[in-house]
Image (spheres, helix red, strand yellow):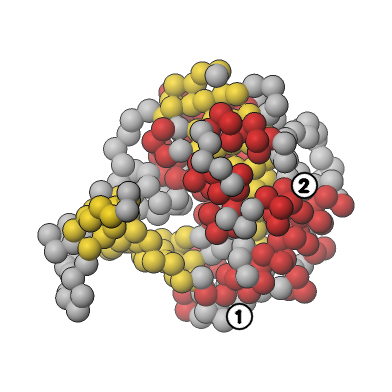
């Protein structure tokens, strides 16, 4: 990993790049929905043509790029967000929310804003995701002169936006700007060879275990995955839900098991963990402490609906991190 240095004055501390959407949570405990186990995994069984009662709904800002931007801002960083937001009422609401959270919007507006519907309350959750204009960010729409930041945080871009990710990675490499990446399963399934241009520009790669297995093309366990992916990126972090998270920098393998907390909705835990880990690194903290910071923020977020509700400030997280989980060197 590149060492932390006091960078010269920049427009932003961090710029996040990724999706933005409206998240609608629908909580139901309808007895008409069944969990059906087929082919080694569980599926939802929903009556065709029927009507299901919803117990409660919640609406929040969503999308990995936007979620992480709000988190960085909450932690005290001057933050910009680059993504493509729709030119519609939902987009107006989302950009107003970013403004309230002191996040500068650096992207274009066109098309229809992304939308996710999260069916919650039945053991875990199922997400229906409409990407909208998120997949249509062209390189010509990127305000390259405004990408002056101490750190770039790249989320998951698909379609035309993926092509733009390649140019963003090249920009980071040419300008010696640290880049962290939190890809999605859709990207990881493309394989390491196709993702190599972005991986080569990365200082930190953060992904969950399923994504790590897809990227490596194996079903290996975490310890092996860390070492395999470290060949591509200096610092690798793999999350595994309630089982915790592991990191490896070529010298030390650390694991944190989060403490038990009441879980209301797990959506957004990954974004909050990953961006908080990077925030701690940006402050020059060591890797074990960064894991504690990430766990503390994730512990807080999963107690509410939405990835940006109940985020801890920097002062709060410094205290919460001390008891966020059990940390050990592997």
Find disc 1 in the rendering and name its residue.
110
Quadrant assignment, res 249: top right
Q: Earlier in the sequence, mark 2 or mark 1?
A: 1
Residue 296 versus residue 52: which sits nearer the camera?
A: 52
Quadrant of the drawing holding the C terminus: top right
Residue 11 position, x and y percent, is 76, 53
Question: Helix, strand, or loop for circle 2?
Answer: loop
Write down the quadrant of residue 306 in the picture: bottom left
Q: Is residue 182 above or below residue 115?
A: above
Q: Is residue 297 visible?
A: no
Do the CB atoms of the residues marked 2 and 1 lie less than 8 Å apart?
A: no
How many dots with numbers? 2
* Crowdedness near tag 1: few (<14), some (14–19) or many (≥20) residues, C-alpha within 10 Å: some
Q: Secondary structure at mark 1?
A: loop
Task: Determine which residue is flagged by label 2.
Answer: 200
Describe residue 24's horizontal placement relative to residue 289 as left or right: left
User: Looking at the image, which is closer to me, 217 or 234?
Assistant: 217
Name the residue rendered at 26%, 60% in the picture: 44
Which residue is pictured at 43% across the width and 27% down the height?
A: 257
In the rendered view, would you say 78 is above or below 162? above
Residue at 67% in and 45% down: 180
Q: Residue at x 78, y 31 (%)?
A: 3
The local crowd at label 2, few if under 14, some if 14 to 19, many if 20 or more residues have their Cα within 10 Å, is: some
Across and down, in percent, residue 78 comes to 66, 49
- Where's residue 266, x and y in %? 37, 47
Q: Residue furthest front?
A: 39
In this rendered view, identify the residue nearer to me: 326 or 234: 234
- Farthest top residue in view: 329
């Amino acid at each position: 990993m590149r060492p932390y240095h006091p960078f010269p004055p920049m427009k932003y501390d961090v710029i996040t790049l990724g999706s933005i959407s409206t998240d609608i949570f629908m909580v139901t405990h309808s007895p008409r929905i069944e969990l059906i186990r087929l082919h080694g995994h569980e599926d939802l069984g929903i009556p065709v043509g029927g009507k299901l009662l919803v117990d409660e709904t919640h609406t929040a800002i969503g999308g990995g790029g936007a979620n992480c931007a709000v988190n960085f801002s909450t932690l005290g960083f001057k933050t910009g967000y680059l993504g493509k937001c729709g030119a519609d009422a939902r987009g107006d609401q989302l950009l107003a929310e970013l403004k309230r959270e002191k996040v500068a919007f650096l992207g274009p507006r066109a098309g229809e804003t992304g939308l996710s519907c999260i069916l919650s309350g039945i053991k875990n959750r199922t997400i229906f995701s409409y990407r909208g204009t998120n997949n249509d960010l062209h390189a010509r729409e990127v305000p390259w002169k405004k990408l002056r930041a101490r750190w770039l945080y790249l989320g998951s871009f698909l379609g035309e936006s993926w092509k733009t990710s390649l140019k963003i990675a090249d920009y980071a490499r040419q300008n010696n700007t640290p880049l962290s990446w939190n890809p999605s399963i859709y990207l990881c399934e493309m394989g390491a060879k196709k993702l190599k241009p972005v991986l080569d520009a990365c200082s930190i790669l953060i992904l969950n275990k399923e994504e790590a297995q897809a990227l490596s093309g194996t079903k290996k366990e975490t310890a092996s995955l860390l070492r395999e992916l470290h060949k591509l990126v200096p610092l690798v972090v793999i999350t595994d839900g309630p089982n915790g998270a592991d990191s490896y920098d070529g010298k030390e393998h650390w694991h944190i098991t989060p403490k038990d907390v009441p879980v209301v909705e797990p959506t957004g835990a990954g974004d909050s963990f990953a961006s908080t880990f990077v925030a701690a690194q940006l402050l020059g903290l060591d890797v074990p402490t960064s894991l504690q910071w990430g766990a503390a923020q994730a512990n807080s977020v999963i107690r509410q609906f939405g990835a940006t509700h109940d985020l801890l400030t920097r002062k709060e997280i410094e205290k919460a991190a001390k008891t966020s989980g059990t940390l050990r060197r592997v």
